[in-house]
Image (cartoon, grey):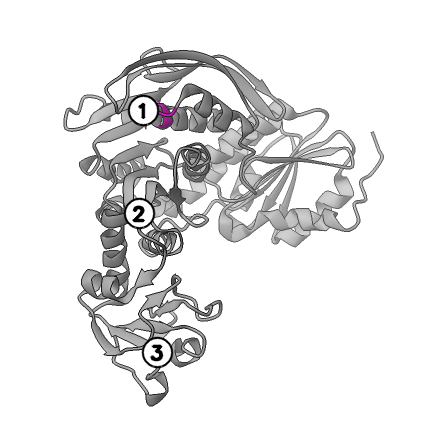
Amino acid sequence: MRGPMLLLDDIVKATGGRVLSKGPDAFSSISIDSRTIKDGELFLCLRGQRFNGHDFLGESLKVARGAIIDEQRIEDSFKDRTIVLVQDTLRALQALATYLRKRSIKNLIAITGSNGKTTTKELLWHILSRRGTAFKNEGNLNNEIGLPLSMINNVSRYGDAHYGIFEMGASRPGDIRELCEIARPDYGVITNIGHAHLEGMAGLEGVFRTKAEMADFVKVLFINGDDRYLERLKTNTDYKIITFGLGKDCSVRAEDIRLEDRGSRYKLIAALQTLSSKGLSVKTDIRLSIPGMGNLYNSLAVAAVSLYLDSPLETVKEGLEDFRGIKLRLEIKEIDGVNFIVDAYNANPDSMKNALKELLRLKNKRAIAVLGDMLELGPYSEELHRELGRLLSSEGVDIFLAVGPEMKKAAQEAKAIEVHSLETVEEAGRLLSVILRPGDTVLIKGSRLMAMERVMDMFKDNVKISRRQ
């Protein structure tokens, strides 16, 4: 096992870079943000649409041990710092990640899908980290910058790992292929195909084709056996397929499902050949502490991967049952007699429908939906928002607070229920504080840029809920 630290020799070998200034030859990690740079780190100068990291080089090197650049800006004041010149800093970041992955991560599992990626990643890490060192994305850093950055910093901070568990996001065709070329996964998980990032995908068929790019790289592909798009992958013989879901033909499935207020119970049934070529047939009762059918599917995906990788059944069961979920993802909170379902990390039409099912399942007296715009839907946005409004009318929601210009179109379609169309999250929070009654159940959800969790800020300091029954 190699010890942690990012070494200059490895950077030069991986990137083909040229050392312009030789200072320290070991670094604690890489940073791309000059505002949060720490002593011991190496600053990587990236470009964005509105910034150029090279413009912050001098300020960063007051703290950082060195930098990777692709514009030859070097001053006398940098002479005690290590400066590496490469052709392209983004490509250098990716090449370094691939180099370290091959050397330091024994088994890499990639996770993609329209919904459930992050929860699946966190839950799988929760189980596999009990069997050995396991790396994962930092937060949801899952794009062409965040993924390699997470890979590099895990290795530089912690050394070698038995498992790497990395989610991969996509907003246009080719994204998953690019990320797989960086990470070189051994195993892949596709959670589902849904209405996410339609703006760059040209519809659901484009989403499927992009997610399925993962199949070209892996030895074993774990797929949702109940997904009508992913079903098309079952007949491929280039890689091993293991399915999870509710169908009788799934390798790992759930039966006798009981959804509860704060989780679910089900019987886990698995029949598959594991990595060690052992035939496995198991049946055990599971009690999840995270709510909703979406999370039940996530747990089946995790069980399938863990069992295939020869994790003991008792370890899998224990890990599934003591996992407590992730902040802002279907969190259930009770405040002064009101139940809040906070699912504000992101939103697309499919995750909205799933969250609404939870709202109505947990409804006690009134069901209130506080919903912000679903973004990145492109030309499909108006109709999908209108469809959501019609769904709210037909399913039993009592009050709808629509936040943002896109959700206003949903409000126009919501008939026979109380509807308020609002411009800002703050307006929604103020109105909610007036209309709430004990016994209400409230869903708060929207795309990440809407920051719908701010609705809850209205209640943190001084909750005043009407006592009208």
Query: x%, y% of residue 431?
Result: 72, 46
Q: Look at 34% across and 44% down and name the residue there.
A: 161
Assess disc 2: are there few (<14), some (14-19) or many (≥20) residues with their C-alpha within 10 Å of its C-alpha.
Answer: few
Q: Which residue is mark 3?
A: 81
Q: Is residue 365 left or right of residue 213?
A: right
Assess disc 3: are there few (<14), some (14-19) or many (≥20) residues with their C-alpha within 10 Å of its C-alpha.
Answer: many
Residue 392 vs residue 35, the one in the foreground = 35
Q: Is residue 356 left or right of residue 99?
A: right
Assess disc 1: are there few (<14), some (14-19) or many (≥20) residues with their C-alpha within 10 Å of its C-alpha.
Answer: many
Q: Which residue is mark 2?
A: 1
Q: What are the residue bounds of the magenta stretch?
A: 306-311
The residue mark sitting in front, 2 or 1, is: 2
Q: Which image quadrant for residue 269?
A: top left
Q: Amino acid at mark 3?
A: Arg
Secondary structure of the residue carrying numbered label 1: helix
Secondary structure of the residue carrying numbered label 2: loop
Q: Amino acid at mark 1?
A: Tyr
Q: Earlier in the sequence, mark 2 or mark 1?
A: 2
